[in-house]
Image (cartoon, rainbow, N blue to C red):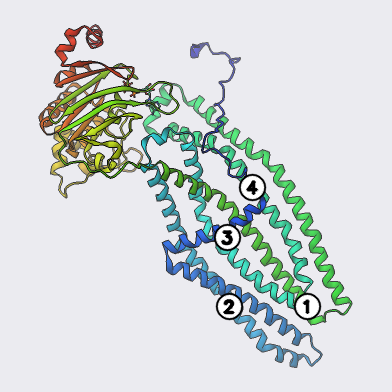
Amino acid sequence: MTAASTESPETPPPPPPATITYNGKHGQNPLADASFSAMCRRLPSVLGRTARMAWAVDRVAALLLLACQFLTGIAAAVVLAFTAQAMTHILGNDEVSERLHDALPALIVVTAAAGVGRISGALSSYANGRITPRLMTEADVALVAAVCRVESSAYGQDGFKDRQEAAEVGVTRTSMMVQDAQRFMSALIRMIAASSVITALHPLMLPLLLLAVIPAGAGAVLSARVDYETHYLNVGDRNVRALMRSWATFSRHGDEVRANGMTGYLIYWYRALSDRIDQRTLTTAPRLLRITLATSALGGVFLCGTWATLAWLAATGRVGLPVAATAVIAVQTTLAALSNFVIYGAALFHTSLYLADMRAFLDMAEELAPKRGELMIPEVIEEIRIDEAVYQYPGKDEPAVAGVSLSLRRGEILAVVGENGSGKSTLTKLITGILLPDKGRVLWDDVDLAQADPDAVWNRTALVPQNFACWPLRVRENITLGQPRTFNDDAVWDVVDAVGMRDTVQKLPQQLDTLLTREMFGGAELSGGQWQRLVCGRALYRQTPLLILDEPTSQMDARGEHALFLEIKRIAAGRMTIVVTHQLENTRLADRVLVMDKGRVIEHGTYDDLVSGGGLFAELVALAKDR
Ligand SMILES: Nc1ncnc2c1ncn2[C@@H]1O[C@H](COP(=O)(O)OP(=O)(O)OP(=O)(O)O)[C@@H](O)[C@H]1O
């Protein structure tokens, strides 16, 4: 260890964060087997999905959008066709006033059609504005719900968090989806309209124009591919960076960061990770430049060919002057429509890559959602039995719970003790069905949790976990979260009293209405022990048949601890209570004590039996007294 004072300027910089190379089941690069043509084939399905999603959120706006697209296209065709007609009159051989007079009806139609085009464009934007926010909300809520609903074990699966990070980008990209699709469709309709006009002028013109824009389209698709490849390479690092960012800047960890001198290293670390992400992004710049230059040059050559052909057709009398003049306008219009068609086609493809990630994650989350069965759990549970339960976390060599059997009856208080990592918390997760055992069974009144509806199980469970959440909500919701029962606050105040928090809550600026977060204006903050009392209050408020408290008093003062255990004892008759604790004296209140070691139950009995038994429990009690 190097003391801070002994550091010299020569001290080498700390190592940068480890590179995360991920090759798990869900780590396949979706571009690896996506050919250019496969990418183009994808567009109709993206358009279809966009239309379905838009239809689902706002039918009126979706219909309006569709109608406007057609109107815009028809207006473009009318403008072009009547411009050709007007040109024929304007460039005729009569008197100027007569030529203008003859051209007037066509010019009026052109003006009216242009007006219709503009109005439908504005209405399209309005419809898009109605659809997009809701589409984003739908995608966002679907993602949050999917993550909240997966089996708890899914969080530990290879690449779950990385895929989630990729899906988050998909949610953001939803904002572009309707706009891209709308522009693409509008360009497509304009293109069809303009191409039919230009083909009518001379059949050679359209193929030439197509040649002029195809390189730009290919360039846009290739660039999208390169951009997505880079995005994909950066997923792991971005995920870690986002996690570190929220931890490093979260006010609750601020004291730890400062007082442990972490600031410098965290900033260095954050920058190193950002530099690595930038580095990958920057290496793509020359590739993108090469693609753009090559495709622009090719497009330019073809465009010159188009103009040269038009000049040749006019010069050799193959097309008349009025037709040639119209052709100039038609070429410009078609060119713009074609360019938009390929550019927005590529943009849509680009967006679709991210949306595919979102879709893939939602499918993955669906696969990982509980599929246990629909057996119901009785309102009153008499017994919970565990038969030879084994559970091993993914990627671990040893099971965390290695064959535990036990039974717990209504009215009993069970204390679970053991050294760090002995499997106590994992056992509580098995008892509550948060995890299902790899082997063995957990039965609630003879209902196997593997076949029970998980919501029915969790409606009957209250858990104070070791690492609890301090929700940025009001005091009231921090207690009632998950189970708002009444419209008055009596039951809330009852549990506030039960955990000895009345004084504290009454001194808060808005009592139960006080927002418990320092980050927001008007919010208040509680101390660690006060938070723990509140979290215990949350569990007591639920009044469930099973109450599990995992290290519930680790931050509490003696008075809080005493009040809580009195309350546990008072309400014990109507439920089963499990207390996981390192405060061995607290196990006196339990009917039985379970001692765990390396995932197994090695001792089991009353406090007095175990103390006099001379085993691990007795040793731990002696060590605690010897401090
Ligand atoms: N989410 C997880 N993923 C992988 N391994 C885990 C996970 N949670 C716990 N473990 C491992 O399982 C074993 C048992 O952990 P558990 O949290 O059940 O122990 P514990 O007895 O509650 O410990 P403590 O007294 O420190 O709270 C440990 O080896 C731990 O590293």
Residue carrying label 2: 115
Q: Are marks 3 and 1 in contact (CB under 8 Å)?
A: no
Beta carbon of the mark 4 residue lies under 8 A of ligand 1:
no
Location of residue 270 in the rendering, given as x and y in whole percent from the top left corner: 53, 31
Q: Amino acid at mark 2?
A: Gly
Q: Earlier in the sequence, mark 1 or mark 2?
A: 2
Q: Nearer the viewer, mark 3 or mark 1?
A: 3
Residue occupying the point 29% across, 40% down: 451
Q: Are marks 4 and 3 in contact (CB under 8 Å)?
A: no
Give how far apart the Cα atoms at labels 4 and 3 are.
18 Å
Location of residue 573 in the rendering, given as x and y in whole percent from the top left corner: 10, 31
Q: Amino acid at mark 3?
A: Pro
Tag on residue 225?
Answer: 4
Q: Earlier in the sequence, mark 4 or mark 3?
A: 3
Picture quadrant of ligand 1: top left
Give how far apart the Cα atoms at labels 2 and 3 are.
30 Å
Residue carrying label 1: 325
Q: Earlier in the sequence, mark 4 or mark 1?
A: 4
Q: Earlier in the sequence, mark 2 or mark 3?
A: 3
